[in-house]
Amino acid sequence: MIEYQELLMTAIDSLDLEMLDKIVLEICGAIQYDQRIFFIGNGGNSTTASHIACDLQKGLSEELSVKALSLCDNIALLTAWSNDKDFKFVYSEQIYQLSQPSDMLIALSGSGNSPNILEAVDAAKKLRVTTIGISGFDGGKLAKEVHHPLVIDSDDMQIVEDVTLTIGHIIYREVLHRAGRGELKHNT
């Protein structure tokens, strides 16, 4: 138990706080300009994507209007794309159909090498959508492909997943704090 706690704290302490602040500013900008923020992930990160989107949309609803959406949540759509085309396209096809230039895609990936995540980032970049990647291990290909990479310095998947959720909560609290200081437009 102590070893896990030490690994978790080490991974949190090693986060690039400058990049995290830059990501918070990008998200604040997307909210300020009424842009959509799409979240994607696989496995545990798919539920974390949904969790963070929920926190931003519902949790900030009294202060802000946030268009945060998890593309992981429509099981019928995910299985239709998987079955009829290929699992690699489950998120990219949604990006092509739902996004507009200046929207944002936040991709969560433990390894940073999931083909469907990378395909979605490629689609987003083609459409001039801002891309953010949160991944562990060495960041994988995702860290090299996104506009704003945040790499969790751990090669333990459970640690990476825990820290990813922690990052989501940090983002939520920072956006809430900035809204409270009047830095973001409020709901009317």
Image (cartoon, rainbow, N blue to C red):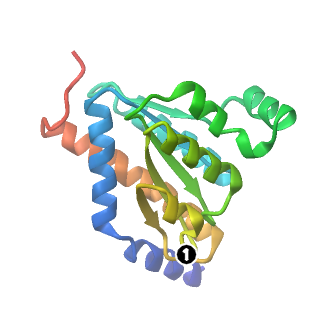
x and y percentages locating residue 3 in the rendered image: 57, 84
Q: How many labels, in total? A: 1
Q: Residue at x 26, y 28 (%)?
A: 63
**Is there any visible trace of residue 72 in the rendered image?**
no
Q: Quadrant of residue 90?
A: top right
Question: In the rendered view of the protein, which quadrant contains the N terminus?
Answer: bottom right
Question: In the rendered view of the protein, which quadrant contains the C terminus?
Answer: top left
Q: Nearer the viewer, residue 30 or 97?
A: 97
**Is there any visible trace of residue 56 in the rendered image?**
yes
Looking at the picture, does residue 187 appear above or below residue 75?
Answer: above
Looking at the picture, does residue 185 appear above or below residue 122?
Answer: above
Q: Is residue 144 left or right of residue 86?
A: left
Q: Quadrant of residue 97?
A: top right
At label 1, the amino acid type is: Asp
Task: Give the structural element (helix, strand or loop) at label 1.
Answer: loop
Q: Nearer the viewer, residue 172 or 36?
A: 36
Q: Residue at x 55, y 61 (%)?
A: 142
> What residue is pinned by disc 1?
138
Q: Nearer the viewer, residue 122 or 21?
A: 122
Q: Residue at x 82, y 36 (%)?
A: 85
x and y percentages locating residue 129 in the rendered image: 44, 39
Looking at the picture, does residue 60 appear above or below residue 13?
Answer: above
Q: Is residue 127 left or right of residue 61?
A: right
Looking at the picture, does residue 138 appear above or below residue 99?
Answer: below
Q: Is residue 179 left or right of residue 103?
A: left
Query: What crowding class fits label 1: few (fewer than 14 Cα within 10 Å), some (14-19), or many (20 or more)?
Result: some
Q: Residue furthest top?
A: 188
Q: Residue furthest right?
A: 83
Q: Residue at x 62, y 31 (%)?
A: 94
x and y percentages locating residue 22 in the rendered image: 29, 56
x and y percentages locating residue 166 in the rendered image: 45, 58
Q: Residue furthest left?
A: 182
